[in-house]
Amino acid sequence: MKVWIKAVSAIAVVIATMLLIAPNIVAAAEEKAILTKAPAVPPAITRAGGVKVIVELETTEVKGALSDGVEYEFWTFGGTVPGPFIRVKQNDTVEFSLKNNAASKNIHSIDIHSVNGPGGGAKATQTIPGGKTGFLWKALNPGIYIYHCATAHIPTHIANGMYGLLLVEPEKGLPKVDKEYYVVQGDFYTVGNTGDKGMQAFSLEKARAEQPTYVKFNALATPGNLKANVGEKVRLYVGNGGPNLTSAFHVIGEIFDLVYQQGAMGTEPAKNVQTTLIPPGGAAIVEFKVDVPGAYILVDHAIFRAIDKGAVGILEVTGKENPAVFKPLK
């Protein structure tokens, strides 16, 4: 009897110990996603996939500058256009929740292009002002994916800025680079003409005719140039929120060493690419080494969009001159 009692006591101790340890095991297998405002990108994920990742976004409707002296009411994820960059690993399970700010005038939702499920999550996230919705999904396919609002009238929600990028890193991760940045193009449609000052309303007529007054990179995001040093390898995650235009993405003075076309992974990336096409609702990853200091201009090479409508960004590269690669002649 004493032996039996001791055995039961020993088992009880083991079970109690397991119960105490279990919460830590659960905590180790669950993490909250780091979300960043463009052009910043969350750090690379060094762990294996298979973790439960918590992602929380809030939709808001905010006024901001569309161009110098031009104000506009953006509809946003997280108060920015594009919305926050989301980074997970292949085989992660994502618990996604969407909150719609109580001050919003419209229902909002999300369609994440990396989701295998009805509407990419849109059916589960039709969220009234002040409401909260969510769903669970598994990241099965690696790649870089657009997310956007999918509430009627869907084109209007997208045209007002409701899009962003989500990266599903492959099982073995991506090769290390020195700098990573996040850029998304969008086309905007105002009642006034390009350059008209003051508060501008959305023009459904121009949007249906696919005649944007502005085409912007990171329309409502952290201002300032992208930065790199001579000799560094740069990776750009480039998306196109649309809703209408296909982007001919180009960096003036650079050649893309690698391009993951359409954001696809699992096949050999294209090499030595001058310009890459990114359709509305699509994305790409481009990589290149910067050899010479200077200002490198990011453009949509449908060049009127860059020069006249705003589809321009700057990569500022500092460091020593490299006359073996480039040297002005006097």
Image (cartoon, rainbow, N blue to C red):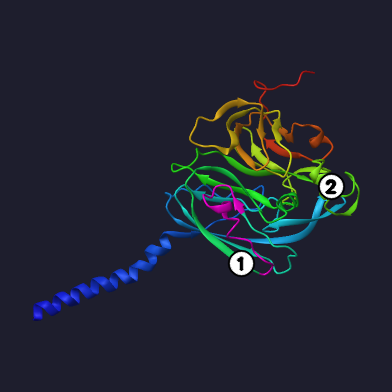
In the rendering, at what x and y percent does residue 143 appear?
53, 42
Identified by mark 1, the residue type is Lys
Quick check: can you spot residue 279?
yes
User: In terms of secondary structure, where does tag 1 sit?
Assistant: strand
Chain-order first, disc 2 or disc 1:
1
Give the vertical position of 222 relative to 297 (above or below).
Answer: below
Q: Which mark is residue 65?
A: none
Neighbours of disc 1 within 10 Å: few (<14), some (14-19), many (20+) = some
In the rendering, at what x and y percent does residue 170 appear?
47, 42
Q: Residue at x 65, y 22 (%)?
A: 325
Depth-wise, is mark 2 or mark 1 nearer the camera? 2
User: In terms of secondary structure, where does tag 2 sit?
Assistant: helix
Q: For this view, does 47 lie left or right of residue 249? A: left
Residue at mark 2 to residue at mark 1: CA–CA distance: 32 Å
Q: Residue at x 42, y 52 (%)?
A: 50
Neighbours of disc 2 within 10 Å: few (<14), some (14-19), many (20+) = few
Give the vertical position of 24 relative to 326 (above or below).
Answer: below
Q: Are marks 2 and 1 in contact (CB under 8 Å)?
A: no
In the rendering, at what x and y percent does residue 275 appear?
67, 29
Residue, disc 1: 132
Magenta-tinted stretch: 111-130
Question: Where is residue 317, by image quadrant?
Answer: top right
Identified by mark 2, the residue type is Glu
Quick check: can you spot residue 233?
no
Q: Nearer the viewer, residue 16 or 180?
A: 16
Q: Nearer the viewer, residue 22 or 140?
A: 140
Residue, disc 2: 205
